[in-house]
Image: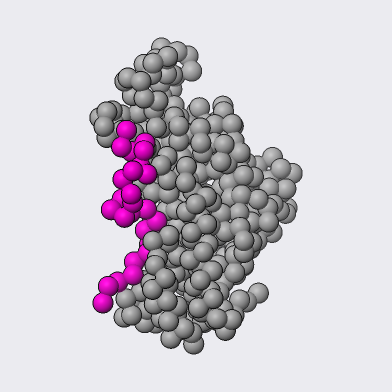
Amino acid sequence: MTVINPHQFFDLSQEDPQSLTHFRATVADGQLFRYVEGDRESAGTLVERHCAGYFGKEAAAAVANGTVGLRLALRALGVGPGDRVLVSAYSFIACAMAVCAVGAVPVPLDLDSALTPDTTALESPEEPVAAVLIVHVQGHAVPVGRLRELCDRLGVPLVEDVCQGFGAASADGRAGALADLAVTSFQQSKQISCGEGGLVAGPAALVEHVYRMADLGAVRREGGLPDWDDERALVGENLRMTELQASLVLDQALVLDRTLARQRDRRARLREELGPDVPVLDSTHPDGDAASHTLFLARGADDAAEFCAGLAARGVLARVVWKKTYPEYGVFRRLLPSAPHPRPRKAEALAPRILSVPTSKYLTDMAVSRVAEAVVAFRRHLVEEEA
Ligand SMILES: *Cc1c(COP(=O)(O)O)cnc(C)c1O
């Protein structure tokens, strides 16, 4: 039995080499470093320009990965030691870790089963908030309109983690569009992937700061030569993206609409085969999500585990997206004070039950049918959407 592992949205071995124009150009001229010598324009620069436009921002900085992108975004916003940053409780552990890496304290933000953030903590905060980090989930855009309003009222910057939301939209618009800084990842399991990679998009001045921190603090002269005597130079690290990464990202970014259409087609077919009786955890905006994944809600944590095991036995890899909220991990339980912020109880109850079945563009009709049959067989483990 072949295993259906669609947790990969870009598989070099399944792509037509002719379509990989930028990747082939990079390999052909052998200039793998960001500061390309010769006539070819840096793929890194092209990716930055393309993604800035995509997120509706002035500029973007390509970096080594998404975690670094989050950390540098927070630093550029002036978040530092002792600051409190509200972070979606239901998120990848890298989000809270990036906050800790700048010495700040992550404070969990609860959410409901429609993935809508609980904004109570921002309605009238008792302690100052330095930033809000909201996280989009598996191709589903979390609605951020109300958060944006509250952040504006308080003068607090909003960072959107679009690592899993590239191509997704909610009723509030495209994921990343309302953020002061939008951060994405191009790691293996993301919508656009090159193994590892990341990007920060936002206003030119903030992005320039991010870029310098990732480029040994240099101010780059014409032709790419670094200048550390310029008064704008700072102490940085080398967290640049390579041309190999950037050219792979670019080739995928330029055909994203086609990929999304194919995923939506795969997901529509899956839903059709599942029939009306199988409850799908609807995105907030059914036409707007990236359709990279279809989410289901299990009755309980044990049901979720049995669902995954049952599907795996049928050669279909499903996953509990994030088994716990980040404050529940030992590493954070030791580090973070339990008081004064309230526990994100809704997110704690939801996390072990949110299941994901990806709907990648590579799924054949036959594979979709096998996924549907497997899900139907374990239908009893799923519940309707709940408040
Ligand atoms: C993948 C991911 C990250 C981290 O990105 P890396 O490129 O793996 O460092 C951060 N947040 C979310 C939601 C992610 O899915």
* Front in this rendered view, residue 324 or 332: 324
Where residue 37 sits in the image (x, y, percent)? 31, 20
* Front in this rendered view, residue 209 or 286: 286
* Front in this rendered view, residue 111 or 190: 190
**Hey, which residue is sitting farthest front in the picture?**
18
* Residue at the image position 71 percent from the left and 53 percent from the top: 146
Where residue 306 sits in the image (x, y, percent)? 39, 82
Where residue 381 sits in the image (x, y, percent)? 48, 84
| Image: 343 above or below 11 | below
Q: Give the extent of the magenta segment.
A: 1-25
Is residue 205 shown to the viewer in this render?
yes
* Residue at the image position 28 percent from the left and 53 percent from the top: 13
Is residue 10 a member of the stretch shown in magenta? yes
* Front in this rendered view, residue 4 or 338: 4
Is residue 337 shown to the viewer in this render?
no
Is residue 20 a member of the stretch shown in magenta? yes
**Quarter the N terminus occupies:** bottom left
* Residue at the image position 68 percent from the left and 47 percent from the top: 148
